[in-house]
Image (cartoon, rainbow, N blue to C red):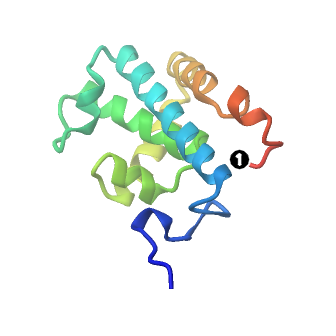
Amino acid sequence: MAVMRPFETRQPIGGYERKSFIWLIRRNRIQAHLHLAEGYAARAYCIMPEELYRNTRGKMHVCEARQLVMYIAHVVLELSRSEVARRYNRDRSTVAHACRTIEERREDPEFDRLVKSIEGLVTLEDDPAIGHLGGLV
C-alpha cells in the first residue's frame, strides 16, 4: 500500500481532486489574483500589504482595505468564507460582515468605481493562463 503525503490527500476542492493538474492551476491562479487584489487595495488605501494580515483591526483605513480584499476574495474569486477567514486569520462571520459592509458602501458612486476597477483587474475571466482550460476553472 502506497503511503500518501499530506498534499496528496485527494480531497475534492472546487469539484477537482487535490492532486489534479487543473486543481493546481486553479489554486495558483486564484492565489496570484488575490495577491494582486491585496496590492491594489493597499495602494488605494496607502498602506503596506502586510498590514492586511495583522491580528488587530488596525486603523480605520486598514480595516476598510481588508474588508475590500475579503469581499473581492469571496465575491469575485469565489473563495468560501472559511477560506478567506483562514487567510486573514479572522472568523467566517467577520468575512460575512465585510461583504455586507462593502455591498452597502457600493451605493456611493466613487467607492463603487474603486471596487469595479479592482474587480476588473483581478477577475479570472480574462486570465490568459486559464482561458485554454475551456472554462474548467
> Disc 1 designates what residue?
137
Residue 45 in the image: state x and y as whole percent. 34, 18
Compared across the picture, whether 102 is left or right of 59 comes to: right
Compared across the picture, whether 129 is left or right of 61 comes to: right
Of 27 and 120, which appears nearest the observer?
Answer: 27
Compared across the picture, whether 88 is left or right of 1 comes to: left
- Residue visible at 54% across and 25% down in the picture: 115
Residue 131 in the image: state x and y as whole percent. 77, 33
Of 129 and 1, which appears nearest the observer?
Answer: 1
Mark 1 residue type: Val
Vertical arrangement, residue 91 with respect to residue 76, above or below? below
Q: Outermost residue toward the right?
A: 134
Q: Outermost residue toward the bottom?
A: 1
Vertical arrangement, residue 8 with respect to residue 43, above or below? below
Q: How many marks?
A: 1
Residue 63 in the image: state x and y as whole percent. 28, 34
Compared across the picture, whether 119 is left or right of 2 comes to: right
Secondary structure type for disc 1? loop
Residue 80 in the image: state x and y as whole percent. 51, 56
* Quarter occupied by residue 56: top left
Of 42 and 137, which appears nearest the observer?
Answer: 137
- Residue visible at 30% across and 25% down in the picture: 49
| Mark 1 nearby-residue class (10 Å; few <14, some 14–19, many ≥20) | some
- Residue visible at 27% across and 19% down in the picture: 47
